Image: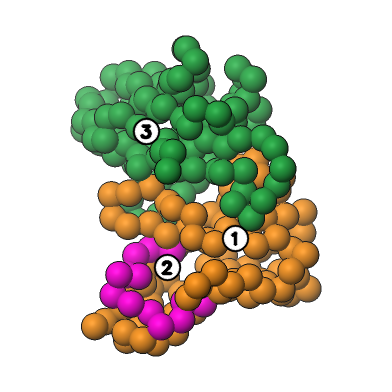
Chain colours: A orange, B green
Amino acid sequence: QQQVKQSPQSLIVQKGGISIINCAYENTAFDYFPWYQQFPGKGPALLIAIRPDVSEKKEGRFTISFNKSAKQFSLHIMDSQPGDSATYFCAASKHLNKFYFGSGTKLNVKP
Amino acid sequence: EPEVTQTPSHQVTQMGQEVILRCVPISNHLYFYWYRQILGQKVEFLVSFYNNEISEKSEIFDDQFSVERPDGSNFTLKIRSTKLEDSAMYFCASSRPGTASDRGYGYTFGSGTRLTVV
C-alpha cells in the first residue's frame, strides 16, 4: 500500500515562475508532513514542514498548503530559481517515528 | 550546524560478502534510523533504534540486516550476505526527544553511503 503519492514525477519551470508539487496521503493518523530537498549525491534536507492543525505554512519562497479533509498537501516554490533545481520529496509521519516518502519530483528551473 | 556523518561515501562489494555501513549521529540525539534509496526510487524506511534496541523495522529489514550502537557515538548497519538488489544509497538519520516543533525534533539525514554489489 502506497502511503504517500506524489506528483508530478518531473517538472520544468522557467526562472521566476511558480513550482507546484502535490502529495496525497492515506493514513489519517499522520501528524507531521515535511518536504525534503535532495541534490545529487546528497541526503534529503528538510525544507519546510507542517502539522495538520494549520492549513498553510510559509517560509521565504516556500509554502506548504494543507487540506486535511482531502488528505492532500502541496509545496509551492515562488520565484523559482535555477538553484532550486533538485529532487523534492514529500513525506508523512506519525509521532515522528518512521517517515513514509513520496516517489519524488525532479524539478528543473530553466534560466 | 550539527551533521549526521556517514562512512564510507561509496562502497563496492562482491555478492555474498558482509558489509558494515557506519554512521555518527548528532551527539544529543537518541533516536536513530536507517533508510534506503534504490537509484531513481523513493526513500524507504528500514529500521528505527532507541535505547539500544530496534523499535520498528520494515519488511525490507530481514534477517540479513542488523543494527548496532557499539559505543556512544557510532550507529552501524550490517548486511550479512549482500545481494545484487541491495545496491542502493543508504541513509542514516537521527532525532532527539523533547518539545515537538516544526523542525521535527531535529530529524536529520546524513549524506548517505552508496553501496554497489557486484
State the separation of the CA atoms marked 3 and 2.
26 Å
- Placement of the N terminus of chain B among the 4 image quadrants: top left
Q: Residues within 10 Å of mark 2 (few under 14, many from 20)?
A: many
Q: Position of residue A38 (x, y in %)?
A: 38, 57
- Are discs 1 and 2 less than 8 Å apart at CB? no
Query: What amino acid is found at the position of numbered circle 1 in the picture?
Result: Ala
Q: Residues within 10 Å of mark 3 (few under 14, many from 20)?
A: many
Helix, strand or loop for disc 2: strand
Helix, strand or loop for disc 1: strand
Q: Position of residue B55 (x, y in %)?
A: 65, 28
**Residue at the disc numbered 2:** A105
Q: Is residue B83 magenta?
A: no
Q: Which residues are magenta?
A: A75-88
Query: What amino acid is found at the position of numbered circle 2 in the picture?
Result: Thr
**Residue at the disc numbered 3:** B5
- Placement of the C terminus of chain B among the 4 image quadrants: top left
Q: Is residue A80 magenta?
A: yes
Q: Is residue B72 left or right of residue B14?
A: right
Residue sitting farthest toward the front: B1
Q: Quarter-wise, where is residue B57 in the image?
A: top right
**Residue at the disc numbered 1:** A49
Residue at 49%, 60% (x, y): give it.
A47
Q: Position of residue A32 (x, y in %)?
A: 67, 55
Q: Earlier in the sequence, mark 1 or mark 2?
A: 1
